[in-house]
Amino acid sequence: MSKLTQSFKPAAPRARVYLDHNATTPPDSHVLEKLSTWANDWGNPSSIHQAGRGPKTRIRESRDAVAKMIGTSALEVVFTTGGSESNNTAVRGALAALRRKGDQRRHILSSALEHPSLRRVFDSLVHEGYEVELVPVDRSGIVKVSDVEARLRPGETVFCSFMLVNNETGVIQPVKEIARLAKAAGAYVHTDAVQALGRIDLNLHDLGVDYASLAGHKFYGLRGAGVLFSRRGAPLDPLIHGGGQERNRRGGTENTLAIASMGYMCSRAGEVSDRAAKMKELRDLFEARVLREIQDSSVNCLASPRVASTSSLLLPGTDGETLLMSLDMEGFSVSTGAACSAGSPEPSPVLLAMGLSRGEAQCSLRVGLGWSTTREDIEVFIEALKKVVARLRSLREWQPIATERPHEPSMKVSL
Ligand SMILES: Cc1ncc(COP(=O)(O)O)c(C=O)c1O
């Protein structure tokens, strides 16, 4: 029997088609309905008087719901403000605690695919005496377990961080196998699971990691709440020192409203696989039509294990920024890459790390489907995309690759 017992209505009016769910998701309509009730619990959850009891209960219920959804104990759930804070806390918090206990190991292993909220922490750690090694990736977008195994150094590798789902390609990484090997080598393991929450079923204990990062606004909750899963017994010093909240793992008065919205959405974990199956049908239809109807288009990581909600396209003869702006004017919200890099003319570091040329990375487009995406959305979007691509190609006098004349190398498409 279908688990989709509750209707899902987007909060935003549907004049436009929103296909950028990897950047953020619209709050679920039930979340918006419950906001004023939650807001009425305005007290400080740390207060021991009456006003603190309501918010304290909300946070407890949310913690239980999150823990149930991700297969952990409630005590292992630390509320933060979002994915970036969770990533920063996992790395810096674990390493600080380990150093304090006298751990001398300084080798960190991660991948070339990680989000800037990890990449930049690693950059700063290099200046603090750590050696950070990034496992390369090829066009499959998958971190190979054997490449990780070859770089693990027992006695030296202290920390490994490998994302579970890539935000640009949607590729699901073999984190369980990586975690098993890294743990066997004595390292602590973190996964950035921000793009996994609500897209695939999660069981973090089964995954075998020590830490994981999540963000509520990627799963139809409000911005301002995230989670750091910290396995019981895993070393963790707080990044933000404060009044002892979150069992001394994250100081600061909790954002009850955002936390309540995240907890509420996690209580709907049972819907994830059916929603994903519906999105996969739409995504497959979308990609099949793009490949068939837009000449020389391709889909990044087509054959790799991917979440159903992400499609990363290469559209030669266009450039992502102009494509994005033209589609925006037509009423469609999509992205050229990570939300945080939007507006930057630099091509996606993730696509470059996968071995795409700058030109290829510059003509990429990320389409992110969500729970409210309909077949009609996809159909109108394909028509708009075809139109915009054709217009951009004609402006650039682009020649199709397939019909390129062999004796005229100067006709070669300049990507
Ligand atoms: C994989 C990944 N990690 C971390 C983040 C950062 O999350 P937040 O925006 O909640 O700080 C994002 C956001 O795009 C992401 O996609």
Image (spheres, helix red, strand yellow):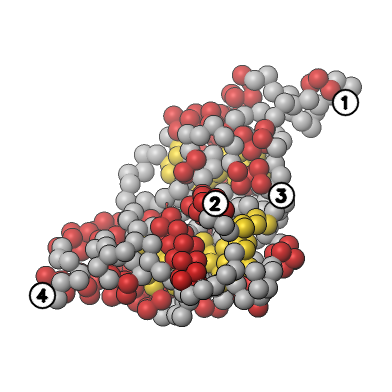
Q: Mark 4 highlights which residue?
A: 49
Question: Residue 329, image x and y in percent?
Answer: 44, 29
For residue 381, above or below residue 63: above
Q: CA distance from mark 3 to mark 4?
A: 57 Å
Q: Visible in this render: residue 140?
A: yes
Q: CA distance from mark 1 to mark 2?
A: 51 Å
Q: Earlier in the sequence, mark 3 or mark 2?
A: 2
- Give the numbered dot on residue 139: 3
Q: Earlier in the sequence, mark 2 or mark 4?
A: 4
Q: Secondary structure at mark 2?
A: loop
Q: Nearer the viewer, residue 353 or 400?
A: 353
- Give the numbered dot on residue 127: 2
Residue sitting at x 66%, y 42%: 352
Look at the image and tell me in which quarter the C terminus lies. Answer: top right
**Kind of residue at disc 4:** His
Give the farthest residue toward the left.
Answer: 50
Q: Secondary structure at mark 4?
A: loop
Query: Nearer the viewer's eye, disc 4 or disc 1?
Result: 4
291 to the left or right of 268: right
Q: CA distance from mark 4 to mark 1?
A: 80 Å
Mark 1: few/some/many CA within 10 Å (<14, 14-19, 20+): few
